[in-house]
Amino acid sequence: MQVEEELGKLPVEKDMLLTIGVFDGVHLGHRYLISQLTELARQQGLLSGVVTFRQHPQEVLSPQTRLPFLTDLAQRTNLLKNEGVEAIITLSFTPELAQLSAGQFIGLLKKYLRMRGVVIGPDFALGQNREGNTDTLRRLGQEMGFSVTVVPPIIINGEVVSSTAIRNALAEGDMKRVQNLVGRPFSLHGRVIPGTRRGAELGFPTANLDTDPEQALPAEGVYVGWVHINDQAYPSMTNIGKRPTFGGSERVVEVYLLDYHGDLYGQELTIDIIERLRGEMKFDNLEELKKQIAEDVKQGRAILKTRGGN
């Protein structure tokens, strides 16, 4: 069984307190739960650990439904480490794993990870047909000898913080709501690839970002933010859309760095997206487009100035 092979390769030298989930976005709700995990583990002399998955379970359970991710596995891992988690266990979510009962999966965690307890949210469920809800896990805990701690959700402006709520806010281009739910600016990562050079012809050279096709993106439009290069942050304008003025049909992500001069091709960029300026527009001619871009840059600088830096 693949899950046993993966678990069996992990060196575990201490009993562990675990939480389990995808943790896509590592948002404020996740971070609160993890803070409870690490504190309880400290109090009990246990190792704090997160069991996460390479694939979102929905990819296996409902492959016809596309679920864009907020953070890829590398981003998630780094963010979880930044929250003080001592061990991150990454498993492949396979049809075989999906068929395990809650008791079977917990048994594997106890056997291979020396699990002494779990810390979960109120809507958590694991195992075949999501049978392992909080009530089931409490019963299993009594039978198998592990603790179950349920952490309440975080509510902001009347809304439960969740990855779904963040995807919905992104789809609306509401970056303020996204940042309120995540607790930090929404970031995009990608390698700069050659583009059409139309931005340079207009006097606003842009870098085209090769983002993962499964990456969740904000609504099409123009955004202001910061680009991080070699520990330096540069004000930027990011256009997400199909470039209708040029008859485009595929969605692209292109960024214009306001105060940077240099060759970016091949570099990995991180963009913090702060605010949406406007939706995507089609212009009758290039002069109208140039005039609008100049106005976008002016507005963008003003917004970043009021934010007091990155």
Image (tube, rainbow, N blue to C red):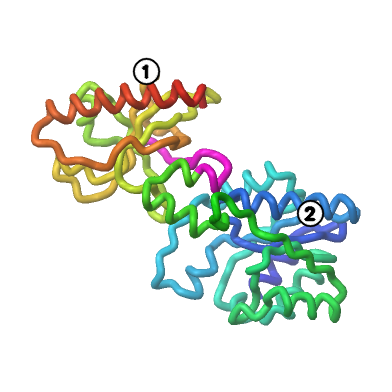
Task: Residue 229 in the image: state x and y as whole percent.
Answer: 49, 27
Q: Quadrant of the N terminus?
A: bottom right
Identified by mark 1, the residue type is His
Where disc 2 sits, the SS reads strand
- Residue nearer the viewer, 224 or 199: 224
In this rendering, does residue 193 appear at all? no
Horizontal side of residue 254 vs 135, given as left or right: left
Quarter assignment of residue 260: top left
Q: Residue at x 65, y 58 (%)?
A: 153
Query: Is residue 186 shown left or right of residue 112?
Result: left
Disc with the residue nearer the chain's start (2 vs 1): 2
In the rendered image, residue 110 lying in the magenta stretch gets the answer no
Q: Alpha-carbon distance for marks 2 and 1?
A: 45 Å
How many residues crowd mark 2 within 10 Å: few (<14), some (14–19), many (20+)?
Answer: many
| Left or right for 299, reference 29 | left
The location of residue 159, given as percent across then percent down, is 54, 56
State which region is magenta.
179-192
At a point 25% along the width and 23% down the height, the residue shown is: 294
Query: Could you say which disc has been placed on residue 261 in the image?
Result: 1
Give the residue pinned by disc 2: 48
Counting from the top left corner in percent of width and height, residue 281 is at 20, 40
Residue 104: mark in rendering: none
Q: Residue sitting at 27 percent across and 42 percent down?
A: 279
Count of numbered badges drawn on the protein: 2
Q: Position of residue 263 (x, y in %)?
A: 37, 23
State which quadrant residue 143 falls in: bottom right
| Disc 2 residue type (three-letter) | Ser
